[in-house]
Amino acid sequence: TAKNGSCFDPPLMDIPCIKWSHGEPLHIAGGITIHFNAAIFGFLRGIDSNSPWFENAKSILDDVSNILEDDLSLSKTGSSATQYRKDFRQCQQLLRDARTLRLEADKLCEQWQERLNNEESIPEIERAEAETKVKEADAQANEAFDKALKHARNDTHLEHQIKLSKGYAELKKLLQGYVKDSSKKPRGPAE
């Protein structure tokens, strides 16, 4: 424009006035390009959807789903499955207890710090008792957490099952995202 001196030449494209009412001048050209690219990618996606790579990904997703439902589920039957479920629940309970103790210890410490900030003088005996309570609560929380970790580490079968279950669940989630029609990841060499 002439006001800021950035452009003094007339436009190179002659756009009829009727087109100005529909928005910017390049809107139509941009739309044509987007639709053209979408058609090309749709065609390539159709070719690659039948490729051996994509078919293999779908079969791996089915295998992973079967493993998670059959081999690694908590609804298995038998004596080893019963022990596994029992150990797993016990580990969960130990972690819940440790988390509860940690929250209580943090709350006690916070209350003590707030009292220290608000009151000018606290008797030494009361101060020593409060600090002892905070240290004991902290020690109990740490001990409970260590107990839960020790339980999980000592039962190597449980630890192994949990790691396998988490890994397979993550793989299943990623494969489901890849196999979806809305996925933008390439499905084969054509894309």
Image (cartoon, rainbow, N blue to C red):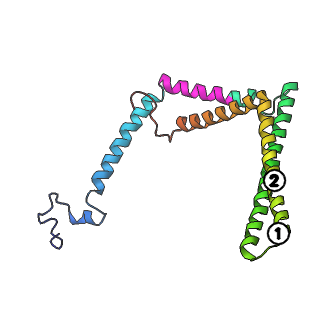
34 or 91: nearer the eye? Answer: 91
In magenta stretch: residue 53: yes
Residue 42 in percent (x, y) is at 41, 37
Cα–Cα gap, marks 2 and 1: 27 Å
Picture quarter with the C terminus: top left
Q: Which residue is mark 1?
A: 124
Residue 143 in percent (x, y) is at 81, 45
Residue at the farthest top position: 52
Residue 101 circle label: 2
The residue at the point 75 percent across, 28 percent down is 70
Above or below, 123 against 129 in this view is below
- Secondary structure of the residue carrying tag 1 is helix
183 or 101: nearer the eye? Answer: 101
The residue at the point 83 percent across, 72 percent down is 123
Residue 77 in percent (x, y) is at 85, 27
Circles 2 and 1 in contact, beta carbons < 8 Å: no
Name which residue type carries label 2. Answer: Leu
Number of other residues with Cα within 10 Å of mark 1, as a class: few under 14, some 14 to 19, many 20 or more: few
Q: Which residues are magenta?
A: 51-65
Name which residue type carries label 1. Answer: Glu
Q: Is residue 162 left or right of residue 61?
A: right
Picture quarter with the N terminus: bottom left
Residue 46 in percent (x, y) is at 44, 32
Majority secondary structure in the magenta region:
helix
